[in-house]
Amino acid sequence: MKLWAGRLQGQVDEKLNELNASIGFDSRMYRQDITGSIAHARMLGKQGIIPAEDAEKIVAGLKDILAEIEAGTLEIDMTSEDIHTFVEGELTKRIGDAGKRLHTARSRNDQVALDLRMYLADEIDKTVELAKDLIAALCEVAEQHLESVMPGYTHLQRAQPVTLAHYLMAYAQMLLRDVDRLKDCKKRTLVLPLGSGALAGTTYPLDRQYVAEQLGFGGICMNSMDGVSDRDFALELMSDLSILMMHLSRFSEEICLWCSWEFKFVTLSDSFSTGSSIMPQKKNPDITELVRGKTGRVYGDLMTLLTAMKALPLAYNKDMQEDKEAVFDALDTAQLSLEVLAPMLRTATFHPDNMKKAALGGFINATDCADYMTKKGVPFRDAYCVTGQLVNRCIELGTTLDALPLEEYRAFSPVFDEDVYAAIDLLTCVRQRSIPGGPAPETVKKQIEAVRAQI
Ligand code: ARG
């Protein structure tokens, strides 16, 4: 029987049911729904709004239901309209009239907002832990490659020497900001909507602060109409997850490139690779391709809710039920991506020799060659021009700056000496970039320590 059988008569159309029901996706909030109801019932009892014995019966009944769902002995009835209806119905089946008092001074509008806020706060914690684990994995691999020189790129053209450690730690920095954003979002998520009622509050003397404290909320929302119709917290979370996925997608793209024979900077372990049904030689980085691809899906989830919320008049509208599938999908996708990238990274084999080869072939020490001349008194612009000519000469001779004979250097400028080779040695180039934020091994080591302290 429907909740509203007093007002509406007859059976609802089956297709309406299919469109209207949300149990298929909101059942995952059963724990939050029950925990929220326990806090509400306790408060109703404390305030003398319902008899204390009834409040006790409700709390005990709800605890049993929760325990049984968790133990797998009580199955959620998927023909219920939503999780709120199921829990209340099950409670009333068990304890009778007392169960019917649970919904006093509450609407599903403030109830669903409460459940979703609680659920998302828990999931934010989980996501933060997963992001921290990926940061830890980046630090672990970086530590092994403080001196693994590789080309840094601009325009995807070899630009200047960096190390794999420095490269990976750039992603650790992005993820640290993601963690920070998620934690910040949690603050705005844990604002209690309960007490907003359907939209206009309630005439009962509720103690909202008490409920907030019991549920670990930082405060209560100050306008009942906003309380039931605000979904900013879900939008903010999906924005944060979109940025996070953008970072994961960039990292994934690097791995896809680095796995190719054109780069071969890394080989993924077999357990994190896939093969082809026709080409026997193939070993594909499907994981990173999928993370890259799924990023679009998370952006789509954000757009789904932004669009659903756009132009909704106050207060609750059923459109808002669309929030859950979008935000759950965004969370599932981001969490799975984090979960798979960390072990993939930990089990990957990087190839410093190939990185070095790429670094040597790309004239990425040309800036250092110009700097060498500058240190000997040549104005930078002139040094820049001469070095450009030297690079051309190398291309002509099919050689590199490191291997170009000193006579060749001298033919362009008398300032060159034997010590030019030390100055443009790739590791030297990296070591000398020891300013804070630079790729010098000692500097990156400090960066790793600082990042570890934050996670
Ligand atoms: N399933 C609904 C949702 O997710 C619960 C709120 C229902 N409220 C209502 N007035 N029908 O939004």
Image: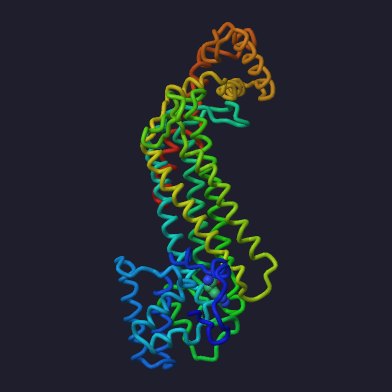
Colouring rule applied to residues: rainbow
Determine the image quadrant of residue 128. bottom left
Q: Is residue 447 left or right of residue 322?
A: left
Residue at x-position 64% and y-position 12%: 413
The residue at the far top in this view is 407
The x and y percentages for residue 376 are 59, 20
In depth, the one of 417 and 4 nearer the eye is 4
Residue at x-position 47% and y-position 37%: 286
In depth, the one of 48 and 439 nearer the eye is 48
State whether residue 393 is above or below residue 423. Answer: above
The x and y percentages for residue 298 are 55, 52
State whether residue 123 is above or below residue 16. Answer: above
Residue 401 shows in this picture = yes
Determine the image quadrant of residue 42. bottom left
In depth, the one of 329 and 383 nearer the eye is 329
The x and y percentages for residue 142 are 41, 37
Q: Quadrant of ligand 1?
A: bottom right
